[in-house]
Image (tube, grey):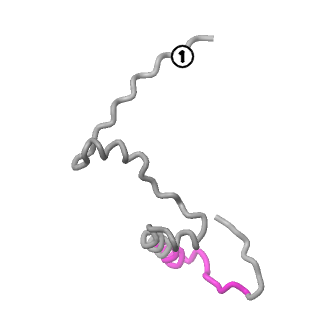
Amino acid sequence: MQDAPPRPPTPEPQPREGVEESQWANLGVLTVEKPKSYRQARVSPQWSDWKKATDEELKSLRENDLGDVIPKPAGRKIVASR
């Protein structure tokens, strides 16, 4: 078995224009966690973004005639899907 060739060095990240060097280190931890439910999205600080994305997706589905939005039957459970 041969040894694997050495990996090239990873380049140092370069600060983005307008971002101070002290802020650059913190950019990697600024993430938005994807909500697991509509309820979680509603209480998220990013609710307006989630709402906009949902509205755009539903609009696209309607425009392309890919499904129908129907009311939930009373007393029935919804089967989860993704």
Q: Which residue is drawn at 49% across and 68% down?
A: 44
Report the number of numbered marks: 1
Query: Above or below — where is 74 with respect to 52?
Result: below
Indicate the position of residue 28 as horizontal and vertical percent values.
Answer: 41, 45
Q: Residue at x 58, y 72 (%)?
A: 38
Q: Residue at x 39, y 28 (%)?
A: 10
Between residue 79 and residue 35, name the one nearer to us.
35
Indicate the position of residue 62 as horizontal and vertical percent values.
Answer: 53, 79
- Whether the magenta-drawn stretch holds residue 40 is answered as no
The single residue placed furthest to the front in the displayed view is 22
The single residue placed furthest to the top in the displayed view is 2
Indicate the position of residue 6 as horizontal and vertical percent values.
Answer: 47, 17
Query: Above or below — where is 38 with respect to 16?
Result: below
Query: Above or below — where is 18 with respect to 80?
Result: above
Indicate the position of residue 66 as horizontal and vertical percent values.
Answer: 58, 74
The image quadrant where one finds the C terminus is bottom right
Q: Quadrant of residue 61?
A: bottom right
Q: What element carries label 1?
A: loop
Left or right relative to 16: residue 60: right
Between residue 42 and residue 2, name the one nearer to us.
42
Between residue 72 and residue 23, name the one nearer to us.
23
Residue where numbered disc 1 is placed: 4
Q: What stretch is highlighted in magenta?
A: 56-73
- Whether the magenta-drawn stretch holds residue 64 is answered as yes
Crowd class of label 1 (few under 14; some 14 to 19; many from 20; radius 10 Å): few
The image quadrant where one finds the N terminus is top right
Q: Which amino acid does label 1 sit on?
A: Ala
